[in-house]
Image (tube, helix red, strand yellow):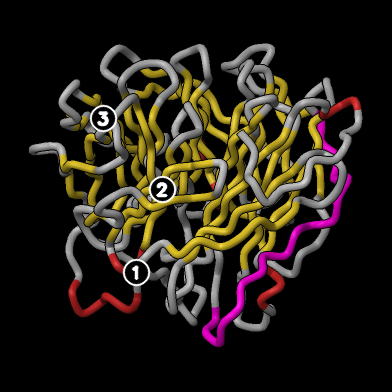
Amino acid sequence: MAFAMVVTTQTPAWSAGVTDLIWLESNSTAGNSILTFRNNGTGNPTFLGSTPASGIGVFDKTFALGPFDSDQNLIVNDDGTLLFAVNSGSNSIAVFRITPNGLQAVEGSPFASGGSDPVSLGLKGDILAVVNKDQDPAQNANLVLPNYTTFRVLPNGQLIPAENSTVSVAHNSSPSQALTAFEGPFLFGADFFGGLLQSFRIDEDGRLRQNLPQALPNSIFADQTAGHQPLGMRTHPNLPILYVDITPISEVAVYRYDGRGVPSFVRAVADSGAAPCWAVVNHTGTRLYATNTGDNSIVVYDLADPLDPVEIQHFVMDATIGAPFSTVIDQSDEFLYVSSEQSSASATPVANAFHTLKIAPDGTLTEPFSPTVLPIGGSVPVRAQGISVFGTK
């Protein structure tokens, strides 16, 4: 698949045949848009165009924790045929067909999200999981409980709410991610302010069967005064293992999970960066990448023993004025993409950008190209969120 407006150029040997399409969303309160880029490995990714998502984003002028802490704001299905994106400020999910001519909204898009302030999406087969965070400052007069809920994705991309699928969580618990497991029909969530890990079994009809929520082990916080706040998560691609970033103390917790999706704590390992927020694992299960918002870095872990990650690199990325957040890895395990967002009122809009990191055969990182600034216009302040990728041949 290649977008029609793209001119193909010769690529160096290390990326021969690999072309990535990268999507981010503007998250603008004046009109959310999906921004499409193409990376063929020869230089900074090329901007292909902007597609309206028929909804609006969120913005909090205080830059407080909560409203902006989320991952998987937009995702692509395994076939690379559908893209799903949140409209956090208008409580809807936009769905697009990915075509050679660009993104095309499916009939009926956007669809109601089943709650307030959707921020994260996960896909398991034809079941789409949604986290409704309920922390949009513009909707504070109409607060409802945050929730996890599911939809069935029809073959044409339309969304149908799954019956009896909504599980509400505590007010202001700030759920931040809808992580579907590689191994098993499970959904994991981190209630950031609530300090809890959520786990669910996903029935064939899409209904969520909630397990007992778990607090992080007190043993991790011995002699610590920081909050017990889990955030970014990823599962191992081949084993029932869950990795959880513990942002306030710069550690990554390792869990096993059983046949019901119930996690059991194994250990926590140190992260030499500051404030790990999000994480990805490569497709072979040999490397874990933790994104550190506090020092603009990625820590790379060797997963020779998947239950005992060993740090092998602390890579500081080029400065963008903003702070790094969501991270994705392409299907070839050759590129890692990291979104950067305006993180303070004093930062300029050019803080909304993304990094293109090259992955060496040993899993370590370099940054061969300058960060790509997002072409977001308009007169309202914007903090872009979310990043997704699909590799084409």
* Element marked by disc 2: strand
Q: Is residue 277 visible?
A: no
Q: Quadrant of residue 362?
A: top right
> In the rendered structure, which segment of residues is drawn in magenta?
364-381
In this orientation, which residue lies closer to the viewer: 161 or 301? 161
Instruction: Identify the disc placed on residue 200.
Output: 3
Name which of mark 3 and mark 2 comes first in the sequence. 2
Residue that numbered label 1 is attached to? 89
Residue that numbered label 2 is attached to? 96
Name which of mark 1 and mark 3 comes first in the sequence. 1
Q: Residue at x 31, y 39 (%)?
A: 157
Query: In 3D space, how far apart are the residues under numbered discs 3 and 2 (Cα atoms)?
Result: 27 Å
34 relative to 212, above or below: below
Please state which amino acid type lies under the numbered disc 3: Phe
In this orientation, which residue lies closer to the viewer: 293 or 30? 30
Does the magenta stretch mainly form a helix, a strand or a loop? loop
Instruction: Identify the disc placed on residue 301.
Output: none
Residue 298 at x, y percent in the picture: 72, 43
Would you call the spot at circle 3 few (<14 residues within 10 Å), some (14-19), or many (20 or more)? many
Q: Residue furthest bottom?
A: 379
Please state which amino acid type lies under the numbered disc 1: Gly
182 relative to 148, above or below: above
Q: Assess whether mark 3 and mark 1 are in contact (beta carbons under 8 angstroms).
A: no
Residue 306 at x, y percent in the picture: 60, 16
Q: Quadrant of residue 289?
A: top right
